[in-house]
Image (cartoon, rainbow, N blue to C red):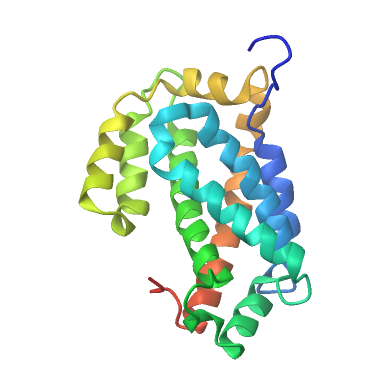
Amino acid sequence: MAEGSETMYFDLRTVHDHFNRSLIQEDDIDIEAYLEAYNELYKFFQLMGSVFSFVSSDLKQKIEILQVRVAEDSENYVTMKKMIEYEKASKLLERNGFVNGARTLLRLHRGLDFILEFLRQLGELSSTDNTSASCQDAYNKTLAKHHSWIVRKAAVYAMYTMPTRETLFKRVCGDEVQRNIDILPKMLEVTADVITRTQSVFEIHELTGLP
């Protein structure tokens, strides 16, 4: 990077720690900690450049929407369960012109499912293996079902340019590749817990199909 520019690398330890902190009680998620973890994950998409442009800008917008909700109403937007219960009771899910937190978080949840599956497959590759097939497979198993045909075709086509695992990790982690590889299993475990809890909350409230 040019002198004076901000050096920004992806850190799986940061993701792990924030997601771990987000797991509160036995079945709830702290929204602020969740968003802190997601902000770190967003760096991954930024560092990969145009390959993930089909999803990165949308995820950033969703993160910012929820950050505003938390800042403006920290009483009701403190945990995932409390947020959904509040929005349902206040009929905010039905209000025209209001971007509700439940729908916004559902989009992030779907994106996280893709991230988890892709990183899980990366962990199973050798350093010289190409990552494009794993990325396409992870996408087709997760986010693809929520995208239009045009977006799906463009996304899969872009993934053909994905590098080897070694090159990818160097691009997003800088000089801390091994540190990130070492924490990857624990990060995957805690992220899977976050996804399971989130899915459960949305299923209980019958909101998995929010348009």
24 relative to 207, above or below: above
In this image, 211 relative to 7: left or right? left
35 relative to 52, above or below: below
Residue 99 visible somewhere in the drawing: yes
In this image, 114 relative to 136: left or right? right
x, y (%) of residue 56?
48, 42
x, y (%) of residue 104?
52, 64
- Quarter occupied by the C terminus: bottom left
In this image, 153 relative to 88: left or right? left
- Quarter occupied by the N terminus: top right
x, y (%) of residue 124?
45, 35
107 relative to 55, above or below: below
* Residue beneath the point at 45% across and 82% down: 206
Residue most toward the right? 75
Residue 154 vs residue 202, the one in the foreground: 154
Name the image quarter holding residue 75: bottom right
Residue most toward the front? 97
Residue 37 vs residue 6, the one in the foreground: 6
* Residue beneath the point at 75% across and 71% down: 73
In this image, 17 relative to 141: left or right? right
* Residue beneath the point at 51% across and 36% down: 45
Residue 65 vs residue 44, the one in the foreground: 65
x, y (%) of residue 80?
64, 71
Residue 186 vs residue 75, the one in the foreground: 75
Residue 120 visible somewhere in the drawing: no
* Residue beneath the point at 70% across and 71% down: 79
8 relative to 82, above or below: above
Q: How many marks?
A: 0
Residue most toward the top? 3
